[in-house]
Image (cartoon, rainbow, N blue to C red):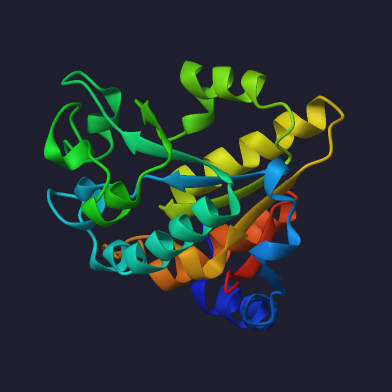
Amino acid sequence: MKINKEEFIKSNLKTIEDIIDLMNNVKKVNINILDASKTALVIVDMINGFSKDGMLKSDRIAGIIPGITELSKIADDLKIKKIAFADAHNQNSPEFDMYPKHCLDSTSESEVVDEIKDVGGYQLIKKNSTNGFLEDEFQEWLKSNQNIENFIVVGDCTDICVEQFSVTLKTWFNRNNMKSRIIVPLNLVETYDLGTHNAELINLFASFSMMGNGIEIVELEWKI
């Protein structure tokens, strides 16, 4: 099916404007309103290979390191559990048919950035796909932490690993008739710019898509 570019842009411009307005006015959520004993912070792929070194590094992703580092410290103060996912592939990863070779296991690219690593306090879970939910170690974590119902998901990329994990987690809770809050802060997720992968546009539509799947898209505040 071919799309008439001019007609498409004209007929959908109002919808795009409405989505922008929606994202510009998301609710503010302070981490202090969440029951810390039922909350986890999930840090997705804040690793060297996406922010500092390698074929897939992005200055946009590097830009959210300070905010996530600060939030990680606050989570420790509040005794909120933390998970950090890290892409860690072997040489034969099928992902390399879609993306340049990146984040090989046991290399610097697969390591959490020093700023977040220095704060520590998280359970590191390596992942060999874009969806950390599928990792056996995370499944074991879920079984061992059945009291956790609030998940704050930060990191990258908004439209890939963050979105896939968040939506899968939400649908898992729904399938099991369990209440949950999956919270994705707009100010602490990011994606990359490359050709037609326009970061501003992709961030907008990925966030809107998650919202339609029951994810809470918010502006997170954490001043105590």
Is 130 situated above or below 106? below
Provide residue 86's location: percent of width, then percent of height.
34, 37
Identified at 63% across, 35% down, the residue is 168
Q: Residue furthest right?
A: 177
Is 56 situated above or below 16? above
The image quadrant that residue 204 belongs to is bottom right
Provide residue 52's location: percent of width, then percent of height.
17, 56
Numbered disc total: 0
Identified at 84% across, 39% down, the residue is 179
Q: Is residue 50 left or right of residue 213?
A: left
Q: Closer to the camera, 90 or 188?
A: 188
Provide residue 66's location: percent of width, then percent of height.
34, 68
Identified at 43% across, 73% down, the residue is 200
Question: Could one spot residue 1 in this view of the protein?
Answer: no
Question: Could one spot residue 79 in this view of the protein?
Answer: yes
Q: Is residue 66 left or right of residue 151?
A: left
Is 29 situated above or below 150? below
Q: Closer to the camera, 45 or 224?
A: 224
Identified at 72% across, 42% down, the residue is 38
Provide residue 83's location: percent of width, then percent of height.
47, 38
Could you tell me which quadrant the C terminus lies in? bottom right
